[in-house]
Amino acid sequence: MQYAIMDFTNFSNDDFISSLAVAISLLTFAIVLSHNKKKAKSDQFKFAMDLDKRIEEIDNKISSLIEQFNRSSKSEDDRKNFQDAKMDLFSEKLNTFEFFSLLINNREITNKSIIKHFTPTFMDDTGYIFKEYPKLEKDKEKYQELKKFLNRI
């Protein structure tokens, strides 16, 4: 096989325009790819901020519930209602952790600083909740993604 080396002195206008079009296309592709990576990273931070806000809202509900219980007569009914409401809020928190763990496990969230930021909260809160309500931990159907994430750490 013989290969012809292109003589740039005989480069026609059509060849120049074709080469320029290819170069512009490649440059455009690189810019779009770069923008998409930045947008994906920005979306991950936006989601992390939303998650942080959601966790704070649940924590505030738990604090209000505890304050309300402390002001109550602490009858047997009050205690049962308090424990049920507290378990519901803890379940809500675990469901939030579960969804975030799903995104991490499926590599939708890959930013290491975001994962590192939430890991201690997930570990501490999940450990506390499971200790307080062992039936939540023993439920084989629930919180599989969260358990999978915490086991990987």
Image: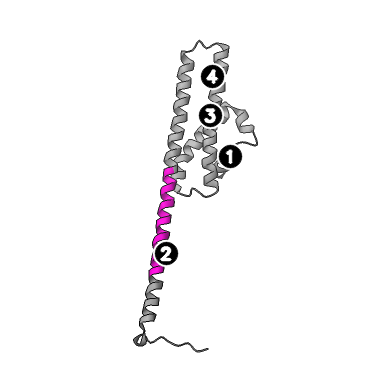
As drawn, 56 above or below 70 = below
Disc 1 target residue: 147
User: What residue do we see at 42% from left, 50% from top?
Assistant: 41
Q: Specify the amino acid type for callout 1.
A: Lys
- Write down the quadrant of residue 35 in the picture: bottom left
Q: Specify the amino acid type for callout 3.
A: Phe
- Badge 3: residue crowd in 10 Å (few <14, some 14–19, many ≥20): many
As helix, strand or loop, the secondary structure at mark 1 comes to: helix
Label of residue 58 in the image: none
Mark 3 or mark 4: which comes first in sequence? 4
Disc 4 target residue: 82
Mark 3 or mark 2: which comes first in sequence? 2
Disc 2 target residue: 29
Q: Is residue 135 magenta?
A: no
Which residues lie in the magenta part? 24-46
User: What residue do we see at 36% from left, 87% from top?
Assistant: 10
Rendered location of residue 118, percent (x, y): 46, 40
Q: Is residue 33 magenta?
A: yes
As helix, strand or loop, the secondary structure at mark 4 comes to: helix
**Left-right relation of 24 to 71:** left
The Cα atoms of the two marked residues, 1 and 4, are separated by 26 Å
Looking at the magenta stretch, what is its main secondary structure? helix
The Cα atoms of the two marked residues, 3 and 4, are separated by 12 Å
Label of residue 90 in the image: 3
* Viewer-nearest residue: 117 or 26: 26
**Left-right relation of 136 to 121:** right
